[in-house]
Image: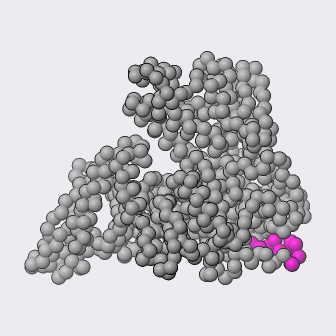
Amino acid sequence: MRFDLSLLNANDFVVNQFEGGLFVPQMNNRASIDDSQIKGVFFCCALGLIYEPRNQNYPMLKYSWKNTKISLIECAISADRSKRVTLLKMEVDHEVCLLKNGIFAPFNTNNAGAKAITRLFYFGKSARQVFTLFNELIHTNETFGSVITENSNYLALLSKTYQSLKITSSVFNSFREKILFNANVAIKSPNTRQIASVTLTDSCMYINPSCKLHRTGVLAFPLNTVLFGISFENVTNFTLELFFTDPQLSHPCYKADELLHLEKKQRYVDMFEYSFMWNCLSIRIEFVAKESLYKFEDLISPWYQRQVDLNDVQNKWTNGDMSNFDYLMCLNYLSGRSLMCIERYPVLPWVLCDYTSEILDFDNPAVYRDLTKPIGALESDRLDSLRMRHNTMEDMIDESNTGLSELLCFGQIVTSDSATTSASTSNAESSSFFDDFDMIMPPLKSASVLEGETDVSIINRDYRSYDPLQRLSMVPFLYGSHYSTTGYTTYFLLRQHPLWSLILGGGRYDLPDRLFSSIPMAWENCQSSNTDVRELTPEFYSCPRSADKWLGLNDSIIIGRTQANESVGDVELPPWAHSPKDFVKKMRYALETDYVRNQLGKWIDLIFGVYRDPRNALQKDNLFHPLSYEENFASMMQEYAVLLDRFIGDIGITDRLSSSREAALTQMKEFGVCPRQLFYDNHP
């Protein structure tokens, strides 16, 4: 099956799916309808339609409900026209063709021009049912504004779809099972999100997704197979990722524990196949409300076979009972990052700086990167340039702050003489960019408490043109890009997950000259470019058996040719790596050396610790764009909520604020977010 949920647009979801076919008039000279159609599956979604032919020689077709007209027609089939069938006629202004012959090539969009594109679909006895549903979705899409998720018709359709997913006892493994919990949720995979219903009984967890791929229907997870769970809350969702034993794995997830008797270095090298998070089956569940998350976690946590606690994993690593890789993966998950979330993919450091030598000497400190500095601070000339830009931004605020005498910058007061006052770094006293909102503008009050005010035009005129995103963008920073973004993840994993890159690029790959083609070049770029400060993904250090998948190019991917007329092929490896598998093994060996172990705490301070805090980050040249910090984003969302409540009767202002808020959400998802801070003292 070629269909993938990542083909759906943002906020889209599968409403229903039908068996049917594309009726081809040129084939209509046979004795039956079966000979006059290209059979396939129709995925009927909230925002559009995707048709997947069973025959991979034909491309998949994607349509939008907007500017679409449909009707039912009678059509004669067979040479003597003695048989008639009901067809659904659809007229569209464009059609997207993709994945023909199962090849991951750029999508082809056919635009209608003066005359609409017409397609005829056959649904058999379901024709009128499908027609009714299509008509409803077309009408619903006509009402959508710029912010779909706030549209009442969209929310009604979402509620109706959730209702259809409600799980009944008829699917339970045993009639004795007792229902403990029901909820509407979303299931997150790396580049997709689909709505689903979850039911928890006293012995099993059931999930009913809206899209029934491979005819799986309701998924059942016995609770005695739950290893552990990690929950995470942020401004956009409330998430619990559950990890299960997988009987199909050749080694249990906890196999690494049996290797503790081996000699230290050999144990770390062998453990790359047994990283307990890497070889787990996991399900990432997003809840609508935090109360639902708390209740579900309370019910399922007694089944956990192990606990993943920050103090526990830190002690294990400090005592030498956990590899550097497993420790970093634990920290990533505990900070809200996951292999099941491309926007918050786990981040690991470059640990080597030698990608040109024929032989790699692991005992030579010169081959290792300085882990006490962020990537952006490793090259002094670039760092000087970034510092100069930061200082210029501060000066611009002092000179043109529209009368504002002070600007609160992550707990620092930036005044005209550039003097700064650092805030406390303790967790209890931490404050975000907006905590002293009243310093900059008069305090906002809920419109509901403004007694006697009836004319919105006289309520705080200063706020009518105010935009929280614009104000946050005024805050000075060193790095406008981030070390871990959706784009960087798809960049490294282009060959293993080409669809991720196609979707991110709107159906196109990036220019061939800008694609991931060389390990030495990737390292060189992140040392010299002001906009490239990327770190690495877990694939660089784990699972060498699958290294060919993400470092090698197979025949099912067509990327293009560079300006030098060279085809984009396998990734160029360092001279010291004899194969993709050898490259990953040596990278992992370097990660697990004593030299890196002794320096790793400094890098953890930058990513998960005291210098991740934007109030302290400038001390280590580690300050990123203000939207990269979750706490500031959360405060900005609170400002949007207050403003939207204040101007609820002014459509012009609320539409502008809603659009600005959606832009902020998109920017946060695509341009990188710092992990949640885990440590508030220097890491050992």
In the depicted structure, whether residue 528 falls above or below residue 570 = above
Residues drawn in magenta: 261-273
Quadrant housing residue 469: top right
Label count reads: 0
Is 77 on the left-hand or right-hand side of 345?
A: left
Measured from the top left, where is residue 285 in percent x and y?
55, 61
Measured from the top left, where is residue 297 in percent x and y?
61, 62
Report the front residue among 127 and 7: 127
Q: Is residue 563 visible?
A: no
Q: Main secondary structure of the magenta part?
A: helix
In the depicted structure, whether residue 157 falls above or below residue 278 = above
Is 282 on the left-hand or right-hand side of 97?
A: right
Report the front residue among 226 and 517: 226
Q: Is residue 263 visible?
A: yes
Is 271 on the left-hand or right-hand side of 493?
A: right
Q: Residue at left 40%, top 21%? A: 455
> Which quarter of the rendering shows the C terminus?
bottom right
Measured from the top left, where is residue 371 in percent x and y?
81, 52
- Most extreme residue toward the top is 403
Magenta highlight on residue 596: no
Report the front residue among 501 and 236: 236
Measured from the top left, where is residue 17 in percent x and y?
35, 68
